[in-house]
Image (spheres, grey):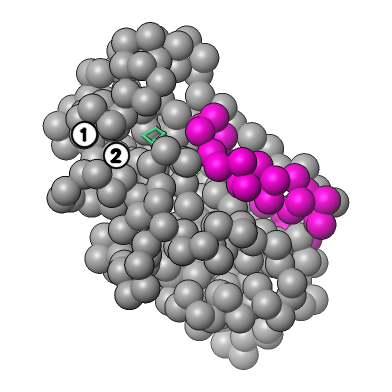
Amino acid sequence: MLEGESRESSENETVQPSRPAPIALGGTLASKAKFLNAALETLSPADRMARLRRELRGRIVFTLGFGIEGQVLFHWICERDIDIDVVTLDTGRLFPETYVLWAETERRYGRKIRAVYPDHVALERLVSKRGIDGFYASKQAREACCDVRKTRPLDRALAGASAWIAGLRADQSLERRDAGLVSVDASRKTIKVNPLFDWSRDAVMAVVAANKIPINPLHAKGFASIGCAPCTRAIQPGEPERNGRWWWENSGSRECGLHLPRRPARAPSKPDEQPAAFAGCG
Ligand code: SF4
């Protein structure tokens, strides 16, 4: 068994007739990712998370952003009682509706969701220098805000984790098409798993409807992908899902630094010391 046995029950998991041979303990991240990709590929998303938990020792972190994908994954984590550390990154700029959904989700599942906040010193410095809505001024300013409010808190949330579960789907955008089911986030020294990678939005919504999973009411108003309030708007029918994010930027990725490789050097302490290659927030 890879990286130790799990302690949690697997009674709901589909029994696999022939399991791939586990790799040895202490393998590289790349070899673990290769093994896990083969092991998880044919499973349902819920089974993927349960199997991941059994295969990996250590803390597995799921970052919940209260989108439809995250709500469905959280539903399965709670339903199956999978030992996964669920965290959310509270940027301080979320929609009021998102905070209401956060509370509603905690009530529905009887579980508190751990919040990770920006470093207050870095945030105070950022707002002092750029202003409260300084991210509209330039791409560099937007990236600086995303770095302080989201990416650095994510780094703290994932520190020491053996794996990171996220809600990416391949058909959300061109950037996400190649995200894969299991990959290595080398800069954060962890394995990243997207259990819904090969699912469509319609399939996710079918699970939402069948299980009456609470979702953000903004989705019904044309908000396909919901992030920070000042940086998210509704989209028109047929537009790519993430077109409502950072719409004032004419070109480039609709991704934030969360799902992009972290630069090798540690983030600078000053909010506007952003390297040109750093590509933002999401
Ligand atoms: S999405 Fe907007 S408000 Fe949120 S962290 Fe990025 S730039 Fe700042």
- Residue appearing at x 61%, y 57% in the figure: 216
Look at the picture and state if 30 lies above or below 112: below
Residue 139: which numbered mark, if any? 1
| Amino acid type, residue under disc 2 in the picture | Gly
Query: Ligand 1 within 8 A of label 2's CB?
Result: yes
Look at the picture and state if 134 lies above or below 213: above
Range drawn in magenta: 81-109
Tell me if residue 1 can be seen.
no
Q: Please tell me which residue lies in front, 151 or 142.
A: 142
Could you classify mark 2 by the number of other residues whose Cα lies within 10 Å: few (under 14), some (14-19), or many (20 or more)? many
Q: Please tell me which residue lies in front, 43 or 101.
A: 101
| Res 155 quadrant in image | top left
- Residue appearing at x 44%, y 34% in the figure: 150
At numbered mark 2, what does the secondary structure look like: helix, strand or loop? loop
| Res 273 quadrant in image | top left
Q: Does label 1 or label 2 sit earlier along the sequence?
A: 1
Residue that carries the numbered disc 2 in the rendered image: 280
The magenta stretch spans residue 280: no
- Callout 1–callout 2 Cβ contact below 8 Å: yes
